[in-house]
């Protein structure tokens, strides 16, 4: 086969499997993530941009492991953990993930409410309407139809790139910050660092990505395309995060506005500093991201819990075929949206804390993932390389050390 034909075949395979990796990478630019990136830019300017480089490497390695495990075994991560480590261990992991994801779902509906309030739409109108929309999207759709809508939503993240350009940042300073690490032992800096990792390499992603790869039916012959899908999704996600940090560093940080109460506040604050269009684009991007993630996060949680506890799960199944899956999805949407309608709920605290919780929970999920993906009886020739084990092991040790340092700083 000629070189051109080989590449034609590879491109065809990529188009056949594109979706799970690209969607999973982009959905982490959700309301909580956008707020975390905005706060990083407002508080620390360009100085935390360097963290995006190692985070991208970690993200690609971890996501690729999850996709590969799904392709080779044909099973979801929660399903494999239950089979290999027992029901009790799986139950506690499911409980922790559900609690963290409920906080994330609440943050998504907070993003819906705050983004449309900029345009004068009350949360008592926007939140119920979006909740009904995302419920019908999944419950009445099929995997293919839902995936197409999710891929369209991914394209709207370009608004953050345009918004970042309109903010007129100092590109030279931004470039220098990407290659010159600035590290502080201040607890606020370290918590922000954990939050950035949690906002980009969230534990739920690994469960959703593997389940999506399995439901899409990606096999070992399509592994090359699945890997490219993951890489493209990770790069796209980090590019968006870069422009969000840059836009807030160029405007809010420079203007001395170091604290913001929500991602929507960042959008509103951009208007006098970067122009009306930058503000509108930021707000529109927040709305799109919030609706997108409000669909994915409950779906990811329902997949994870049902797989872990042995219930039927899948968007291609009817309600009567997978009632626990759909009722859990419904409950998460109802509770997440309902909490937003309670006056006085500290939404910013919930949003930011959910990202930090993701960072603290990630090492435990990675330990299970690493154990499984290095099993020769499960993976055969698709086991991890030494480089992949090194990156994953470093991530686990780093997050545990940061957690211990934060505990020491808080107790001293």
Image (spheres, rainbow, N blue to C red):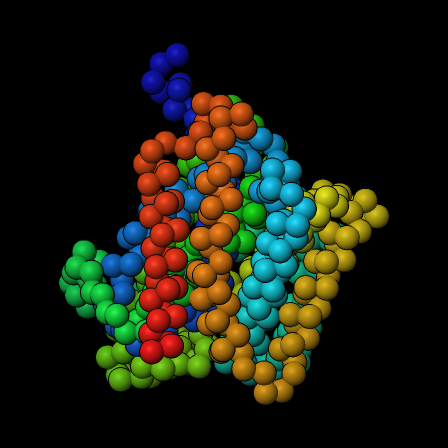
Residue 23 shown left or right of residue 40 in the figure: right
Q: Quadrant of the C terminus?
A: bottom left
Q: Residue at x 68, y 64 (%)?
A: 332
| Residue at left offset 40%, top offset 54% | 237
Q: Residue furthest front?
A: 412
Location of residue 350 in the rendering, given as x and y in whole percent from the top left corner: 53, 74
Residue 346 in sight from this viewpoint: yes
Does 167 sit left or right of 201 as displayed?
left
Pick the front one: 95 or 106:
95
Residue 131, percent across and down? 67, 67
Where is the N terminus found, in terms of image quarters?
Answer: top left
Give coordinates of residue 253: x percent, y percent. 27, 78
Query: Residue 298 versus residue 14: which sits nearer the camera?
Result: 298
What residue sits 75% from the left and 45% below the top?
A: 311
Q: Nearer the viewer, residue 17 or 205?
A: 205
Residue sitting farthest toward the bottom: 344
The picture places residue 327, in percent across and down from the top left corner, at 76, 58
| Residue occupying image coordinates x 72% and y 44% | 310
User: Which image quadrant for residue 209?
Assistant: top right
């Amino acid at each position: 086969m000629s070189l051109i034909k080989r590449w034609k075949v590879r491109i065809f395979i990529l188009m056949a499997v594109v979706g799970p990796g690209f969607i999973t990478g982009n959905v982490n630019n959700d309301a909580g993530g956008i707020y975390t990136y905005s706060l990083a830019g407002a508080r620390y300017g360009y100085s935390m941009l360097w963290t995006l480089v190692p985070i991208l490497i970690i993200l690609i390695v971890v996501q690729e492991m999850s996709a590969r495990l799904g392709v080779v075994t044909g099973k979801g991560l929660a399903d494999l953990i239950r089979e290999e480590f027992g029901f009790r261990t799986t139950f506690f992991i499911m409980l922790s993930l559900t609690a963290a994801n409920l906080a994330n779902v609440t943050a998504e509906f907070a993003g819906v409410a705050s983004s449309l309030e900029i345009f004068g739409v009350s949360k008592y109108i926007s939140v119920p309407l979006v909740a009904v929309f995302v419920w019908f999207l999944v419950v009445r759709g099929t995997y293919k139809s839902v995936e197409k809508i999710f891929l369209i939503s991914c394209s709207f993240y370009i608004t953050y790139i345009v918004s970042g350009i309109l903010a007129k940042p100092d590109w030279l300073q931004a470039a220098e910050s990407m290659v010159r690490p600035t590290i502080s032992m201040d607890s606020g800096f370290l918590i922000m660092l954990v939050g950035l990792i949690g906002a980009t390499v969230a534990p739920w992603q690994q469960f959703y990505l593997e389940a999506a790869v399995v439901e899409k039916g990606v096999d070992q012959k399509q592994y090359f395309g699945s890997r490219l899908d993951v890489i493209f999704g990770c790069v796209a996600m980090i590019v968006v995060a870069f422009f969000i940090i840059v836009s807030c560093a160029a405007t809010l940080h420079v203007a001395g506005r170091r604290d913001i109460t929500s991602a929507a506040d960042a959008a509103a604050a951009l208007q006098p500093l970067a122009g009306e269009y930058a503000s509108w684009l930021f707000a529109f991007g927040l709305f799109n991201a919030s609706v997108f993630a409000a669909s994915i996060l409950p779906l990811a949680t329902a997949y994870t819990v049902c797989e872990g506890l042995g219930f039927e799960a899948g968007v291609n199944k009817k309600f009567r075929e997978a009632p626990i899956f759909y009722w859990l999805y419904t409950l998460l949407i109802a509770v997440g949206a309902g909490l937003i309608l309670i006056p006085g709920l500290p939404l910013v605290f919930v949003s930011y804390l959910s990202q930090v919780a993701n960072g603290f929970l990630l090492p435990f999920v990675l330990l299970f993932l690493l154990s499984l993906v290095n099993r020769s009886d499960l993976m055969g020739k698709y086991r991890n390389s030494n480089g992949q084990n090194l990156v994953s092991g470093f991530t686990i040790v780093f997050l545990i050390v940061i957690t211990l340092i934060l505990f020491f700083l808080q107790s001293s």
